[in-house]
Image (cartoon, rainbow, N blue to C red):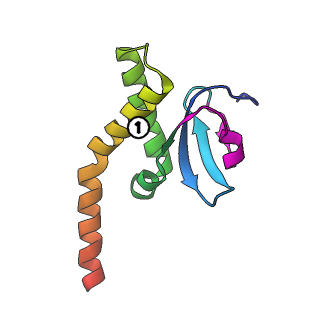
Amino acid sequence: MKESKCKHRVVIIINDYSPYSIDAICMFCGRTFGSNRELYGERSIIDVSEYCLYFGKNNVISYVKKLYDRITCSNSNLSSFEIAKKIKEGLEEECRETIKQLEEIAKKYEKR
C-alpha cells in the first residue's frame, strides 16, 4: 500500500500534462502525485518525461530505480539533491546516443 503522505525528497516526473496536472512518483515509497501543488516543498525533482517518449514509462521507471539503487549503495551519505543530480547524469549518459539515433531516423522519414 502506498503512503498517503510522502515526506521523501526524490521524485520523478513521468509526464507533465499542464501547469496543474502531472504524473509523478516518489523514488522511496512509490506514492504517486497528480498535481504540481503536491510537490511543493524541498524535493529534488527529476523530469523523465522526454525519456518516456522514447523508451516507455515502465522502462524508464525501472532504469531510474536501478540507477537510484546503484547510487545509494555506493554512497549512502548523499543528499537528495546529489542523488537526483547523479540520476540525471546517468540517464543523460546512457540515453543520449540512442535518442540522437532515433531523431536522425525520424528526420530521414520526414524528408520522404
Magenta stretch containing residue 41, yes or no? Answer: yes
Q: In this view, does 88 lie to the left or right of 58?
A: left
Work out whether residue 103 or residue 43 is closer to the camera in this orientation and state it.
43
The quadrant where residue 101 appears: bottom left
Q: What element carries label 1?
A: helix
- Tell me residue 26's x, y (percent): 59, 33
| Residue under the point 69% across and 56% down | 20
* Farthest residue, direction bottom: 112
Quadrant containing the C terminus is bottom left
Q: Is there any visible trace of residue 102 in the rendered image?
A: yes
In the image, the segment drawn in magenta is 30-44
The answer to whether residue 40 is left or right of residue 56 is right
Task: Give the residue type that dot 1 points to.
Answer: Tyr
Q: Position of residue 11 (x, y in %)?
A: 56, 36
Nearer the observer, 30 or 33: 33
The quadrant where residue 33 appears: top right
Q: Quadrant of the N terminus?
A: top right
In the image, taking residue 17 as reference, residue 53 lies left or right, namely left
Residue 81 forms part of the magenta stretch: no
Residue under label 1: 63
What residue is at 57 percent from the left and 26 percent from the top? Answer: 28
Question: Which quadrant of the figure has residue 64?
Answer: top left
Residue 34 is at least partly visible in this image: no
**Outermost residue toward the right in this view:** 4
The image shows residue 39, relative to residue 108, as above or below, that is above
The residue at 23%/76% (across/down) is: 108
How many numbered marks appear? 1
Residues 8 and 41: in front is 41
Q: Position of residue 97 (x, y in %)?
A: 23, 52
Query: How would you rate the neighbour count of disc 1 (Cα within 10 Å): few for under 14, some for 14-19, many for 20 or more?
Result: some
Q: Is residue 107 above or below residue 35?
A: below
